[in-house]
Image (cartoon, grey):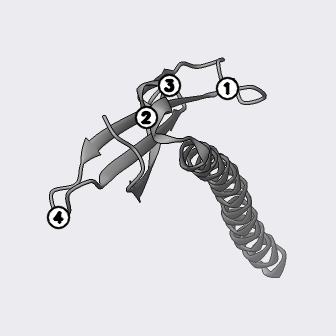
Amino acid sequence: MAGARHRFHMLWLLLLLLLGFLGLQQVAYSTMAGSAVMRMRAAAAVLGNERIDHIRSLDSTAADSIEGEEPYGAIPGQPEYRRVTSVAPDSRASDVNVVTVRVYWDGDRCSLRTDALLASVRR
């Protein structure tokens, strides 16, 4: 009788250990998946800021080349991203425009928006 009770307790212990290992596996997977998402988001932020910096370096005569889309595969070294740039007048001040750069990835399921106020851009 004591042997059967001992086996029963061992089975419960093994079941608890199995559940613990499955929980640890889920935590490890979630951590890795979250890390990949954050890397993609950080790269998108860099691409948005690079575009804003490039626009800031242009003079007002190059304003026609600001708006537009860079489709997937068009950004050097970053084929999994696309960038859309738009310019709109700011409603709070004259001669100021809002430049918006939206970076998409994962088949447009994810995006990041970067805005900047620029006085030198004229439409």
Q: Which residue is mark 3?
A: 107
* N-terminal label among 2 and 3: 2
Please give the name of the residue rendered at 29% of the width and 55% of the height, measured from the top-left corner: 96
User: Which residue bears the numbered disc 1?
Assistant: 75
Judge whether 84 appears above or below 89 on screen. Answer: above
Q: Is residue 67 left or right of residue 105?
A: left
| Image quarter (top left, top right, bottom left or bottom right) of the N terminus | bottom right
Pick whichever, 101 or 106, lies toward us.
101
Residue 19 percent across, percent down from the top left: 67, 64
Q: Nearer the viewer, mark 3 or mark 4?
A: 4
Label 1: state its secondary structure. loop
Q: Quadrant of residue 119?
A: bottom left
**CA distance separating discs 3 and 4:** 35 Å
Type of the residue with mark 2: Thr
Dot 2 and dot 1 residues touching (CB under 8 Å) = no
Sequence-first disc among 1 and 4 = 1
Q: Nearer the viewer, residue 12 or 6?
A: 12
For the residues marked 1 and 4, what is the alpha-carbon distance in whole angstroms? 33 Å
For the residues marked 2 and 3, what is the alpha-carbon distance in whole angstroms? 18 Å
Q: Amino acid at mark 3?
A: Gly
Residue shown at 77% from the left, 67% from the top: 14
Instruction: Give the mark, 2 or 1, whose residue is nearer the N terminus.
Output: 1
Judged left or right of residue 17, residue 108 is: left
Amino acid type assigned to the residue bearing label 1 in the image = Ile
**Which residue is denoted by mark 2 in the rendering?**
85
Residue 98 position in % (x across, y down)? 32, 51
> Mark 2 packing: few (<14 Cα in 10 Å), some, or many (20+)?
many
What residue sits right under mark 4 in the picture? 92
Could you give the CA–CA distance between mark 4 and mark 2, rounded to whole angstroms?
21 Å
Q: Nearer the viewer, residue 73 or 20?
A: 73
